[in-house]
Image (cartoon, rainbow, N blue to C red):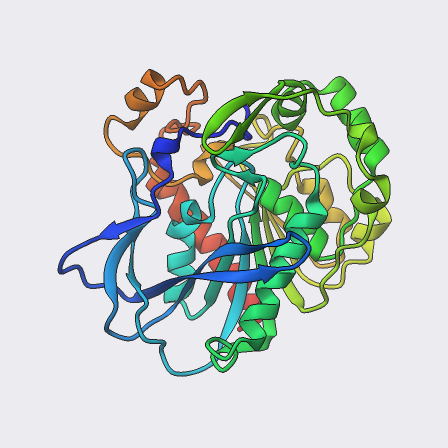
C-alpha cells in the first residue's frame, strides 16, 4: 500500500455543527505566519475548554467519523503543556482529531498545521522530501503559541512536545535533532519500490484537489545541504514518533546525540511492519528512546474510524488503498484506544 496516496476531495471536510451536543474540548482554527513559506499556515488548535462555543465534529465527512469539540470555546484557567502535531503525507491535521481531543481532555494544548505541498488534495512528490519546510512549520507554530497574546498566557513554554505520524514522524524526528543522509535515502529507494519510493517514481501529484502528471523525482538532485541540515528546535522536550518515515536514512551519530525522550510506536507486528517505517533500531540508538508496537494494526490504522459504507464509497471513487481495513480482528476504535494510552502515557511522563 502507498501511505502517500491522496484521499479524494470528498474526505476533506473539517467540521460541521452538532446541535445540542455537549463537549469538553475547545478547538480553534488560526492562521500562523510562515515567512519561509511566503504564506500563512492553516493551523487547528485543541485545548482544555470551559462551557461555551459551537459544538462541532472535527474531521467529519462522508468517509471518516468526526470527533466532538466546541469551536471557539472559552479557555480553561491555567497554563498547559503544548504539543505540536504533524500529519502524514497526503493527510490533514483534522484527521488526527481523535488523538488531539484526548490530549486536550488530559490537559494539553495541541496545535497542528496543514503542511503546504503534502496535504490532502495538494500533495506533490517533489515537496515530500523537503522536511526542512515541515520543521519550519512546526517551529512557526511554537513561535505563535508562545508569543501571541491569545495563547501565551495559557501555554507553558517550558513544556513543549511533538507528535508525528509517518512523514509527520520524520518531521518530529528532525525537530528533535535527528539528521537524514541523502545518499542513504536515495540508495534505499534504488532497491525499495514501495511506499514513499513508489510515490517518487509514480509520476502523479495532486494540486487543487485534481490529479496531475509530474516527472519522476530524482532524490539525488534534492538540495543536499538542506536535506541534511540540523532542524533541531531546543524548545521541544519530548517526541512521539508513530511509524516515522525515512527510517533507513537517519545519521546514527545524530540519533545518539538526541537529549530528549523519543517515544517510538510502530503499527503492526515484527513480521508486518514495513521497512520504510520500522523504528526499533532507531529507538535503540537514541539515549532516551522507548519502543512499542500495536498488534493487529496497519499503517492506515492511524486514520480516523471509517463510517458504514465508506470502503465501498472509496472503491467507487477509484481509491485503491484499503483505507478502512486494519490488520486483524480488532476494531480501529480499539487500536486507537491503545494508541491513545501509549501516547498519553509518554507525554504525561515527559511533560507533566
Q: Residue at x 78, y 32 (%)?
A: 185
Nearest to the observer: residue 203 or residue 164 = 203
Q: Quadrant of residue 3?
A: top right
In the picture provided, is 145 more to the left or to the right than 312? Answer: right
Position in image of residue 118 (x %, y %): 57, 39
75 is higher (above) or lower (below) than 117: below
Q: Is residue 135 something one can see in this rendering? A: yes
Apparent side of residue 134 relative to residue 45 in the rendered image (left or right):
right
**Residue 28 spot, x, y in % from top left:** 38, 63
Residue at the far left in the pictured view: 20
Rendering coords of residue 269 (x, y %): 55, 32
Q: Nearer the viewer, residue 258 or 349?
A: 258
Residue at the outermost front position: 38
Question: Could you tell me which residue is drawn at 45 percent across and 31 percent down?
Answer: 209
Number of marks in picture: 0
Figure check: 156 above or below 224: below
* Residue located 64% across and 49% down the image: 134
Say above or below: 62 vs 57. above
Give coordinates of residue 175: x percent, y percent.
69, 56
* Closer to us: 68 or 328: 68
- What residue is shown at x 48% (from left), y 29% (from top)? 6
Residue 100 vs residue 230: left or right?
left
Q: Inspect this view and state whether residue 330 appears.
A: no
Q: Quadrant of residue 49?
A: bottom left
Amino acid at each position: 500500500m502507498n501511505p502517500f496516496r491522496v484521499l479524494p476531495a470528498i474526505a476533506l471536510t473539517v467540521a460541521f455543527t452538532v446541535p445540542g451536543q455537549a463537549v469538553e474540548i475547545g478547538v480553534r482554527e488560526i492562521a500562523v505566519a510562515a515567512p519561509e513559506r511566503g504564506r500563512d499556515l492553516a493551523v487547528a488548535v485543541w485545548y482544555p475548554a470551559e462551557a461555551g462555543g459551537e459544538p462541532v465534529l472535527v474531521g467529519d465527512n462522508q468517509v471518516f467519523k468526526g470527533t466532538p469539540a466546541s469551536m471557539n470555546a472559552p479557555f480553561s484557567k491555567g497554563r498547559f503543556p503544548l504539543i505540536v502535531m504533524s500529519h502524514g503525507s497526503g493527510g490533514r491535521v483534522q484527521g488526527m482529531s481523535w488523538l488531539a481531543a484526548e490530549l486536550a481532555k488530559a490537559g494539553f494544548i495541541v496545535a497542528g498545521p496543514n503542511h503546504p505541498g503534502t496535504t490532502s488534495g495538494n500533495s506533490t512528490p517533489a515537496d515530500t522530501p523537503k522536511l526542512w519546510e515541515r520543521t519550519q512549520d512546526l517551529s512557526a507554530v511554537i513561535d505563535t503559541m508562545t508569543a501571541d497574546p491569545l495563547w501565551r498566557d495559557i501555554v507553558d513554554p517550558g513544556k513543549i512536545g511533538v507528535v508525528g505520524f509517518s512523514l509527520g514522524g520524520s518531521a518530529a524526528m528532525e525537530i528533535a535533532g535527528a539528521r537524514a543522509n541523502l545518499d542513504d535515502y536515495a540508495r534505499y529507494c534504488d532497491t525499495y519500490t514501495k511506499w514513499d519510493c513508489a510515490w517518487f517514481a509514480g509520476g502523479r501529484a495532486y494540486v487543487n484537489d485534481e490529479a496531475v502528471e509530474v516527472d519522476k523525482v530524482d532524490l539525488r538532485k534534492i538540495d543536499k545541504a538542506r536535506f541534511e541540515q540540523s532542524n533541531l528546535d531546543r524548545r521541544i522536550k519530548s517526541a512521539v514518533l508513530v511509524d516515522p518515515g525515512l527510517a533507513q536514512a537517519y545519521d546514527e551519530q545524530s540519533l545518539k546525540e538526541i537529549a530528549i525522550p523519543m517515544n517510538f510506536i510502530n503499527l503492526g507486528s515484527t513480521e508486518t511492519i514495513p521497512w520504510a517505517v520500522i523504528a526499533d533500531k532507531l529507538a535503540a540508538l537514541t539515549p532516551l528512546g522507548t519502543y512499542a508496537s500495536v498488534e493487529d494494526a496497519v499503517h492506515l490504522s492511524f486514520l480516523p474510524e471509517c463510517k458504514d459504507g465508506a470502503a465501498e464509497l472509496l472503491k467507487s471513487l477509484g481509491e485503491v488503498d484499503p483505507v478502512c481495513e486494519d490488520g486483524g480482528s480488532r476494531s480501529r476504535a480499539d487500536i486507537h484506544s491503545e494508541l491513545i494510552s501509549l501516547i498519553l502515557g509518554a507525554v504525561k511522563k515527559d511533560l507533566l
